[in-house]
Image (cartoon, rainbow, N blue to C red):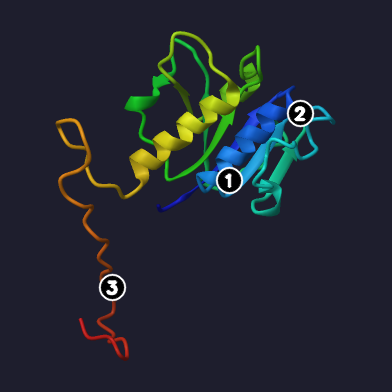
Amino acid sequence: MRGYFGVGAEGLSKRMNLGNLMRSAHAFGASFFFTVDAGPAIRRAPRSDTSKSPDHLPLFEWDTVDTMDLPAGCQLVGIELTDEAIDLPSFMHPLRAAYVLGPERGSLSSAMLARCDHVVKIPAKFCINVATAGAIVLYDRHRALGRYADRPVTAGGPKQDKTPHRHGGPIMRQGRQIPGWEG
């Protein structure tokens, strides 16, 4: 998959949810993880993160929305159950994204929503666990941006394998030849 993504949460209060979200982010190939306005007890690596994700991807801890420092060109995608949010199945994920989820028994702050480039909702009847919501969004990103065979119209697996990636030759603007390249 091309591009990169990070996953984070604002105002989490439960260490188990943080650990599960961190483990899902690591499993789906996140480039970084972050927290915003997390309490001191939350900042320690939770036992539920059995993959020990802080050993494998950077963990950023920002105290406020204003102190968040995302990479240039990275679009912030809020995951929130609001009427105005885009339904996840209809959303095209940015190539460079940071997904932020809200706290348990709460919502993303108005400051965070104002900072988001996109706000997406999982089409569910009510809010679901923050770690579960994160895993659903990351699966959808993989489904949308990964190189998978098309789904068949009928039940079952694909009838054709995905087409293999074909690397093209170098593109030269000045007509210069590359030594050893015959294309």
Residue mark closest to the camera, 1 vs 2: 1
Residue type of the residue flagged with mark 3:
Ile
Q: Which tag, 2 or 3, sits closer to the chain's start?
A: 2
Tags 2 and 3 in contact by the CB under 8 Å rule? no
**Viewed as shown, does residue 66 lie left or right of 32?**
right
Give coordinates of residue 97: x percent, y percent: 50, 41
Is 101 above or below relative to 166?
above
Q: Residues within 10 Å of mark 1 (few under 14, many from 20)?
A: many
Q: Which mark is residue 38?
A: 2
Amino acid type assigned to the residue bearing label 2 in the image: Ala
Say which quarter of the image contains residue 42.
top right
The Cα–Cα distance between marks 2 and 3, rounded to whole angstroms, is 47 Å
Q: Amino acid at mark 1?
A: His
x, y percentage for residue 52? 69, 47
Asked if residue 133 lies left or right of residue 175, the reply is right
Separation of residues labelled 3 and 1 (CA atoms)? 35 Å
Task: Report crowding for label 3: few under 14, some 14 to 19, many 20 or more residues within 10 A (C-alpha).
Answer: few
Residue at coordinates 80% horizontally, 38% vertically from top-left?
Answer: 44
Q: Earlier in the sequence, mark 1 or mark 2?
A: 1
**With 90 as the anchor, is 65 left or right in this view?**
right
Q: Identify residue for label 3.
A: 171
Q: Which image quadrant: the C terminus?
A: bottom left
Helix, strand or loop status at disc 3: loop
- Total of numbered circles in the picture? 3
| Residue 8 x/y as whole percent | 62, 34
Q: Tell me the residue that label 1 is attached to.
A: 26
